[in-house]
Image: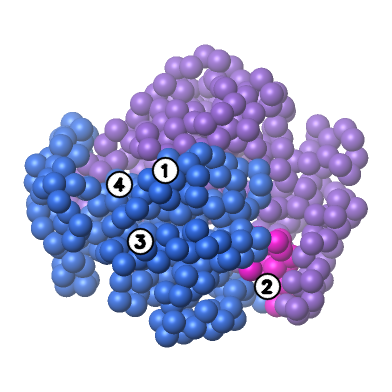
Chain colours: A blue, B purple
């Protein structure tokens, strides 16, 4: 695992890390030994202004996105030293999720975020996903942004939006379990896994898989030590109460009822 | 498992359920056999107007709460037939999370939600949690609401807020791993587990544990069949990339670094 993530260490910016973690000293002193290794963070190709540069992660919100698809990775990434996660949307402001009853704020418009280092596209309900798949403003922004990203990523049906932008032709990828048949329509090669890394594109499976991918990305953007610590920071020691979360092993009745419950909320 | 959740079936409201699931018929027809059993939903003690009554779940937001603590359970509960999940706060409007960089909307003020059937209190950063623990308006609302809830629940350090309201004296409970020592200060009895159910109080461990508790609660508010389907609906088949999410088995270096990373973001 060390090599797996070690290769992504792109530099060390002790000054910023010191500032970022400074607040933690008291807690750490009380908690025992400090981490042995210096914390490392990546220097993206677009880095220009030395140790004040942050890795900008843009999470693309759109009307009808699924809340956990965006917030799972957010929680895994927002405390990674040197990383800043920003919710963006066609227009800055409140964006409604697929239930229509929850709103999350986009801090910046797509225009205000022309060149993020990392792009993350959450999945959404059927209407939200298909609307984004045919929104030329959004697709053009995705294509422009992708040229310069370190990582271009998605959760759930977000991969179908990446696909609609033409970024998944011949690319191994995954998506929400019920939407797997749609991957081939955008030229992607369905590949099993909680997340699939192909070049600089990482696609995650449905909804909660964004947490697994987010922790993987946390390590990719820093090092394995940070990834391991973030997994503990969000106490990710899951114990699913029913053991029915895997569509390949779930019984037909559970699959049918799940499709009823998410009807109108997944492509 | 069937008995475990079966005992919580409080009634059947086929009319509403039919309406709720109506949109899913096409998807289900394409997906195979429909669920064999009728979907059941609970009738809370406060139910007054027949089959238009919904089970109201109030998620208490406050400045400095942790996003995933609230959104994990939201995603597990928002599609449960007959259940409505509403974000509430001292004042309706945008509430900032512990990073200060993310805002989620509270649809109603505490005054506008005087009697939810279920209360869910997410955890937060140190400042957000301690502020709520000393906010008499919030604590009074929690105590009033608790008298009539079917379930009173928390995620992460949210249990310390329940405790500050005086609801955990002598009650088995859990909290964020790094905050376990604080449970005894509010009279609670620390009990291991992703979530701990004691009477009508359910407390979850840190951050991501809210998903496990949310799925458990989905079944408690309906039946095991719905819980099993929601676990699949959010494709909750986790595969933590590092296996360091359990504080009792994580190495000292990972624990120390995690505390640095969450410093200022957990009590």
**Where in the figure is residue B227, as x and y percent of width and height?**
66, 59
Disc 3 target residue: A145
Residue segment shown in magenta: A252-267
Dot 2 and dot 1 within a common chain: yes
Q: Which residue is drawn at 49% across and 31% down?
A: B95
What is the secondary structure assignment of the residue under circle 4? strand
Which chain is disc 1 placed on? A
Q: Residues within 10 Å of mark 2 (few under 14, many from 20)?
A: many
Asked whether residue A44 is in view, the answer is yes
**Where in the figure is residue A69, as x and y percent of width and height?**
50, 57
Along the line of sight, which residue is nearer the eye, B80 or A130? A130
Disc 4 target residue: A84
Q: Which residue is drawn at 56% across and 22% down?
A: B90
**The C terminus of chain A, quarter of image:** bottom right
Along the line of sight, which residue is nearer the eye, B134 or A241? B134
**Cα gap from disc 3 to disc 4, whole angstroms:** 16 Å
What is the secondary structure assignment of the residue under circle 2? helix
Of callouts 3 and 4, which one flags the residue occurring earlier in the amino acid sequence? 4
What is the secondary structure assignment of the residue under circle 1? strand
- Left or right: A67, with B52 as reference point: left
Disc 2 target residue: A255
What is the secondary structure assignment of the residue under circle 3? helix
Dot 1 and dot 3 within a common chain: yes
**Cα gap from disc 1 to disc 4, whole angstroms:** 13 Å
Of callouts 2 and 1, which one flags the residue occurring earlier in the amino acid sequence? 1
Which chain is disc 3 placed on? A
Quadrant of the rendered image containing residue B229: bottom right
Q: How crowded is mark 4: few (under 14 residues within 10 Å), some or many (20 or more)?
A: some
């Amino acid at each position: 695992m060390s090599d797996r993530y070690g290769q992504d260490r792109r530099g060390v910016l002790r000054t910023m890390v010191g500032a970022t973690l400074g607040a933690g000293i008291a807690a750490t002193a009380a908690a025992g030994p400090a981490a042995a290794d210096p914390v490392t963070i990546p220097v993206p190709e677009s880095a220009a202004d030395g140790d004040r540069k942050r890795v900008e992660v843009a999470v693309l919100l759109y009307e009808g996105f699924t809340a956990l698809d965006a917030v799972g990775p957010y929680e895994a990434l927002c405390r990674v030293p040197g990383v800043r996660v920003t919710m963006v949307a066609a227009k800055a402001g409140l964006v409604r999720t697929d239930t229509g009853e929850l709103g999350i704020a986009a801090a910046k418009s797509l225009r205000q975020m022309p060149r993020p280092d990392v792009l993350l596209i959450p999945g959404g309900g059927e209407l939200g996903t298909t609307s984004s798949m045919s929104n030329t403003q959004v697709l053009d922004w995705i294509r422009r942004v992708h040229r310069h990203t370190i990582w271009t990523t998605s959760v759930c049906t977000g991969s179908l939006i990446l696909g609609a932008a033409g970024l998944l032709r011949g690319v191994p990828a995954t998506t929400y379990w019920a939407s797997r048949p749609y991957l081939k329509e955008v030229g992607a090669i369905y590949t099993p896994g909680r997340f699939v890394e192909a070049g600089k594109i990482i696609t995650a499976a449905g909804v909660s898989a964004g947490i697994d991918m987010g922790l993987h990305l946390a390590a990719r953007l820093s090092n394995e030590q940070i990834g391991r610590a973030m997994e503990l920071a969000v106490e990710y020691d899951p114990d699913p109460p029913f053991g029915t979360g895997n569509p390949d092993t779930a019984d037909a009745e559970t699959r049918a009822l799940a499709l009823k419950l998410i009807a109108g909320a997944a492509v």
